[in-house]
Image: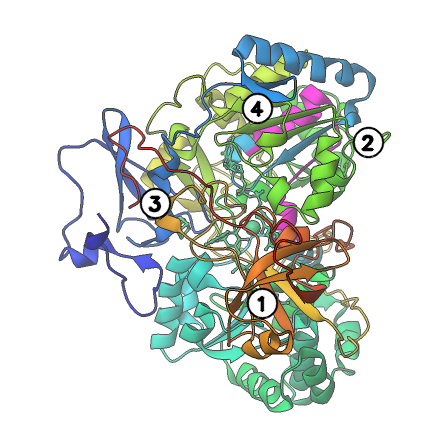
Amino acid sequence: MLDRFAPESDFGLDTFHPNLHLGGMVATSPYLPTVRTTCPYCAVQCNFDLHLEDNLPVRITPTRECPVAHGTVCKKGLAALHDVRHPDRLTQPLLRKGGELVAVSWTEALAYAREALAPAVQSCPDATGVFGSGSLTNEKTYLLGKFARLALRTANIDYNGRYCMASASTALNRTVGYDRGLGFPLEDIGTSDLILLVGANIAETLPPIMQYLKAARDRGALIYAIDPRATTTAKVAGQHLAIRPGSDAALALGVLHLMKIWGRIRPTAPAHGMAEVLWQAEAYRPARVARECGVSEAEIMTLAQRYAAAQRPLILTGRGAEQHAHGTDTVQALINLAFLTGHFGKPGAGYGTLTGQGNGQGGREHGQKTDQLPGARSLRNPEHRAEMAQVWGCLPGDLPQPGLSAQELLNACGQPGGIETLIVLGANPVVSAAGARQVTERLKALKHLIVIDFLPSETAQLATLVLPGSMWCEEEGTTTNLEGRVQRRRKAITAPGGAREDWRILCDLAQAAGRPEGFTYSTFRELQDEFFRATRGGQADYSGLSAERLDRASVQWPVPHPDSPGTPYAYAPTYPTPDRLATLHVPQLPPPAAPRLTLTLTTGRLGNQYQSGSQTRRNPALRADAAVQMHPDTAREHGLRAGEPVTLRTAHGETTLPVLLAPGIRPDTVFVPFHWPGTANLLTSPESLDPLSRMPAFKATAVTLHPAVVGAREPAPIRDTPGEIATPHPGVVMGM
Ligand SMILES: Nc1nc2c(c(=O)[nH]1)N[C@H]1C(S)=C(S)[C@@H](COP(=O)(O)OP(=O)(O)OC[C@H]3O[C@@H](n4cnc5c(=O)[nH]c(N)nc54)[C@H](O)[C@@H]3O)O[C@H]1N2
Ligand SMILES: Nc1nc2c(c(=O)[nH]1)N[C@H]1C(S)=C(S)[C@@H](COP(=O)(O)OP(=O)(O)OC[C@H]3O[C@@H](n4cnc5c(=O)[nH]c(N)nc54)[C@H](O)[C@@H]3O)O[C@H]1N2
Ligand code: SF4
Ligand SMILES: [Mo]
């Protein structure tokens, strides 16, 4: 298979374009039935065709008709079939008996669920928690929120998007009253003349987006990667500003300071708070900013001059800028800069956040956030509560108030007066939550941990009940990509054995909780139509959509009625705020960093792995090793050599990893990927949260290095899932 695919260009790197290689011929067999669907992984949501043989997908081919990636996919997407019939695939409910998880019937599994859920609904509903995911389709997101509020009557539902773009989302919401990652179609990136990628390593994390950067570069745009590491993206971008982790807000304020001095302030629209924001920037002179960011004054001046000269400068943030204890204020500082220089909301310019998970965008709109109702409505707003109560046939007072945010929900598990039962759908917090060791202890202290997954994730392995759910190609639904584009996900095959579609499992659990009313859909279509209808009148209004319409073409929201063409441009003034104006807030920043005695640990991703690794560690086509990246000088100072184990210690925990020498990283920073248990999140803090978004500080933790004494302690489990990968159904192509 692989030899038919070749890298598209020096710019695409991890992106493949099979059609180019076949001289325009599409690499599909004319004999196999195909189903077009969307990728299970990231927020680009590439479309591809699944070719079916004996009712199993045997091959993936990208399609040029994909409105997002135009026939390219990345390695992960191309290898996505691997787990479909993997021997580890969960096909039966598992119940913990005598300490072991053993296979049981659905009847026994649901009897257990009844014991766990039904009494709490009556006596202490908030003792049950629900943890959702940006990997879920819009329909499942909607149903999960409804299930928590109506069936379980709990306030305590939140989701892993809290770990993702919550800071950017919070900053956008409080500035203009709503949040869509990119306010314009991806194509518009090609019209920008200066692109600042702030903590976004897109060549590895969103590879097909590189084609839009290439289009911009071909027209003469300058592209900056602002990242403590010289990433693959930085090498391709050409301009690299290696700032210190956590100093992005100081950089934004420094550029704003110079814009003011150079007479470049021309606000996008009238707004509240502009004078205060400009006043704050007075203090951010280049010398101070250079000191705080750990780069030269000349580099700051050059960047600012280029920003001042650009006609359509675009600031794009990834998790590097956002996942901090002051992530919301960092994004706010960047939005303020874009707004005050007149670029916010313009096509291909201004500010945007690069959403991460497959449905990271839709997942933050339809009610699994603890303070939210479908259509991006607020659970705190009496009118919004009344609207949803009407759709759901309940009283507004029946809807709980907002509850705990994701990390706080995990921290409350098994605590007196806290969470006794947790239901997890689509997340693996044992690996991905901040302070994974402490979180694991909390999960072990629960009375009941119910995990719905299709693979035995590390979280499922701790569960008291595991319910086998559905994979991406086994269900219908919609996802919303990073530019707010709603696309159809199509069912190609049926879930194997006793695995059930997730939406049916949620209805089963509502029944088990003794509250089946509102959860008796006879078909998926009934649920989907209710979901579209429920968003009517909300900011994220999908009510003009239907499966038939999405069959013809994808649409960017809002789509308030069937004749609406959708909304390619989301951030043009005026805004859906009480007085139609934006409000710029003054970023509240920690005091300038004192010279650090310790190193800073930052964390993130590798191109070959996805998230907690649950879906990619088993895949031989996606090999990668856990290691700590450090500058050769740092290694030398600590007496370390390449490949040697080193123990990393923070205030929150420790782990041991091999050294990977990375000359492109700042010498005061080390980088650890989080795709394996026993890696990054043994070192991060479960307590340090952004006050506004409740985002953990994944991207900056003080750390010390200690040569590991071989044999003195167990090294962390860092390798891929051990053992041979047995051959699944002969029709499934392995290791593409
Ligand atoms: N291969 C792969 N692709 C993915 C994913 C995956 O797990 N694997 N996950 C998806 C998801 S959910 C997401 S959210 C996206 C995330 O996509 P990205 O945001 O691109 O991913 P990260 O690696 O978390 O962080 C990006 C960069 O931020 C840098 N950084 C760290 N600290 C700072 C800082 O303080 N300031 C600045 N400016 N930079 C900093 C890191 O060195 C890193 O290169 O990727 C999506 N795509
Ligand atoms: N240190 C550090 N930690 C981080 C980050 C970081 O940069 N650094 N990034 C954070 C970010 S941005 C994110 S998004 C989180 C991600 O963290 P997680 O969401 O915990 O990671 P995933 O590996 O995506 O876990 C998804 C699990 O749900 C299952 N699953 C996926 N889709 C479905 C579905 O449709 N149905 C069912 N039933 N199961 C499903 C998968 O098999 C997998 O076991 O990690 C966060 N943690
Ligand atoms: S992981 Fe993202 S970029 Fe790669 S194929 Fe899937 S949707 Fe496309
Ligand atoms: Mo994410």
- Measured along the vertical axis of the image, is residue 59 above or below residue 396? below
The answer to whether the residue labelled 4 contacts the one labelled 3, judged by CB atoms less than 8 Å apart, is no
Can you identify the residue that label 2 sits on? Answer: 418
Rounded to the nearest whole Å, what is the CA distance between mark 3 and mark 2? Answer: 41 Å
User: Could one spot residue 347 in this view of the protein?
Assistant: yes
In front: label 3 or label 1: 3
Can you identify the residue that label 3 sits on? Answer: 79
Q: Earlier in the sequence, mark 3 or mark 2?
A: 3
In magenta, the rendered stretch is 141-166
- Answer few, some or many: residues within 10 Å of disc 1's Cα (few below 14, many 20 plus, some between 14 and 19): many
> What type is the residue that disc 2 sits on?
Gly
> What type is the residue that disc 4 sits on?
Val
Can you identify the residue that label 4 sits on? Answer: 466
Locate ligand 1 by image quadrant.
Answer: bottom right
SS of the residue at dot 3? loop
- Left or right: 323 in relation to 661: right
Rounded to the nearest whole Å, what is the CA distance between mark 2 and mark 1? Answer: 43 Å
SS of the residue at dot 2? loop
Q: Name the image quarter holding residue 5.
A: bottom left
Magenta residue check for 393: no
